[in-house]
Amino acid sequence: MLQVHVLRNDPAWVKQRLEVKRFGQTGLVDEIVSLDDDRKKAQSDCDNLLAQVNTLSKEIGDMMKQGKKPEAEELKSKVAAYKAEIADLAEQLKKIEELLKDKLVLLPNLPSEQVPVGKTPEDNVNVKESGTKPVLYKGAVPHWDLIKQYDLVDFETGAKITGSGFPLYKGKGAKLQRSLIQYFLDYNTEAGYTEYIPPFMVNEASAYATGQLPDKEGQMYHVTEDDFYLIPTAEVPVTNIYRDVILKEEEMPVKMTAYSPCFRREAGSFGKDVRGLNRVHQFEKIEIIQIVQPEKSYDVLEQMVTHVEKLLQKLELPYRILKLCGGDMGFASALTYDFEVYSAAQERWLEVSSVSNFESFQTNRLKCRYKDANGKMQLAHSLNGSSLALPRIYAALLENNQTENGIVLPAVLHKYFGADKISS
């Protein structure tokens, strides 16, 4: 959530940044500033009346000591009238603050000055491309055929158990999934991230704190009786570990990683873009999260990008890194890099990771603060990234490494999988 003082300091600049993000309701900025004026006036009027009540109360005490009871009673009537006004003002102030908050949460985070201007994914900037696109043998097939050929994932039974978009991994397919999860977690913990296994459902306050609410209600599964939400990513519960927490500067950076299943209602359109593992309602992902001092957050973002890049290099997958344009960015992000791997069988790029700096947008909602060297309370900055999302990594590994005699796995997975390839 944006801080009101940012909007007040330079409303025109805020509107310009919102336009970079293709946010069409920039008039909210003026509404919020006007509401904040109303809030300040109501608070000032309330404070002035309270001061008068305190002054009169002291005078009443003095008069009673001097035996001036009639004069004291007259002042008591004034105090009673002022208290009634204060009660009315307090109620008015409460309504203004609630409306102010309701308006503030509608505003997305402001994009960094580094964010490219653009409307669609086609406007994203390719900052790096690496690896060699494999040339497949004649007769190579996409992963949805490979998983049937090698009996790795059963979509039909998954649909019977739950519904479309809920894959059932089995045998060597389940083992490959588990191998990837263990490798990703080991890689992250070796880099200094503390591992967590969080709850896979969160309450409304947690979903609000990381920016999923009120922006993404339609994308999350809602357990209505308990008012819980199935998590769309481990980012939500893990970041909320530090909700309402005041950190010491020496405790930073906070580095966390977590495995979780992820649940998302949206499944996109029909066609090859959503076939097989390209887009599902339940998938597994390993997340990395950092909470850092504001002046360090963009350096940390680059470190996290490098961390994910090395992970893809060890998986021997061709990849590219995109800097997202304003129109393709998430609600809470100030700057996002996407990673895509090349699928040789599908002949297209598949997104496998997003690494984002949220600056103080999440921590303002979380009320996650720290005391700086001067003892001043500051909002921390939060960052997160996929390290990695499994479905499309899984798909690309199968497709790019298929041979006529099986699927050859990258060397880094051999010890986890217990073999160097998947055979019939």
Image (cartoon, helix red, strand yellow):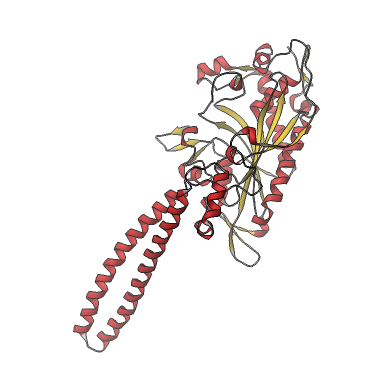
Decide: is 218 above or below 295. above
View extreme (top): residue:
139
Looking at the rendering, in which quadrant would you find the C terminus?
top right
Image coords of residue 123 (percent x, y): 64, 35
What number of labels is visible?
Answer: 0
Left or right: residue 121 versus residue 78 is: right
Where residue 199 sits in the image (x, y, percent)?
Answer: 54, 38
Vertical order, 416 against 91 (above or below): above
Q: Residue at 50%, 59% (x, y): give it.
A: 8
Q: Is residue 49 left or right of residue 181?
A: left
Looking at this view, name the residue that lies furthest to the left.
70
The percent position of residue 87, horizontal first and vertical second, equals: 30, 64
Q: Quadrant of residue 54?
A: bottom left
- Residue at image point 69% right, 44% down: 193
Does residue 293 appear in the picture of this structure?
Answer: no
Outermost residue to the bottom: 66
**Residue at 53 percent of width and 60 percent of height:** 9
Relative image position of residue 345 (x, y in whole percent): 71, 18
Q: Is residue 253 above or below residue 287?
A: below
> Is residue 283 visible in the rendered structure shown here?
yes
